[in-house]
Amino acid sequence: MANKQLQVTQIKSINRRLKKHKMCLEGLGKFKLNKTIVVNDTPENRGMINKISYLLKVEEV
């Protein structure tokens, strides 16, 4: 089984967002606006991405 990965880019600021949404973004990894990181495609990461999908752009690697 191959490990799938997701390329996640933050496209909106976290200013004036809910604390839970900020924590989800921190849980995925430290972000800066318009920066991209690669995370493993796990149910936990998918849940955090779904919760803050309005802040992110997600692509499969």
Image (cartoon, grey):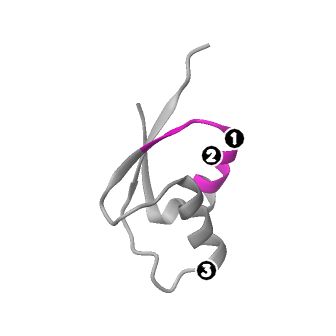
Q: Quadrant of the C terminus?
A: top left
- For residue 46, the mark is 2
Amino acid type at circle 2 is: Arg
Secondary structure state at the residue bearing disc 1:
helix
The Cα atoms of the two marked residues, 1 and 2, are separated by 5 Å
Q: Which residue is mark 3?
A: 18
Give me the residue at 63% from left, 78% from top: 19
Give me the residue at 50% from left, 55% from top: 29
CB atoms of marks 1 and 2 within 8 Å: yes
Binning the other alpha carbons within 10 Å of mark 3 as few (below 14), some (14 to 19) or many (20 upward) gives: few
- For residue 16, the mark is none
Give me the residue at 55% from left, 53% from top: 28
Q: Is residue 34 above or below residue 45?
A: below
Tell me residue 49's x, y (percent).
57, 53
Give me the residue at 41% from left, 61% from top: 31
Start and end of the magenta stretch?
Answer: 38-49
Q: Which residue is mark 1?
A: 43
Residue 32: which quarter of the image? Answer: bottom left
Tell me residue 7's x, y (percent).
41, 42
CB atoms of marks 2 and 3 within 8 Å: no
Tell me residue 2's x, y (percent).
56, 16
CB atoms of marks 1 and 3 within 8 Å: no
The Cα atoms of the two marked residues, 2 and 3, are separated by 19 Å
**Is 48 included in the stretch rendered in magenta?**
yes
Frontmost residue, 57 versus 34: 34
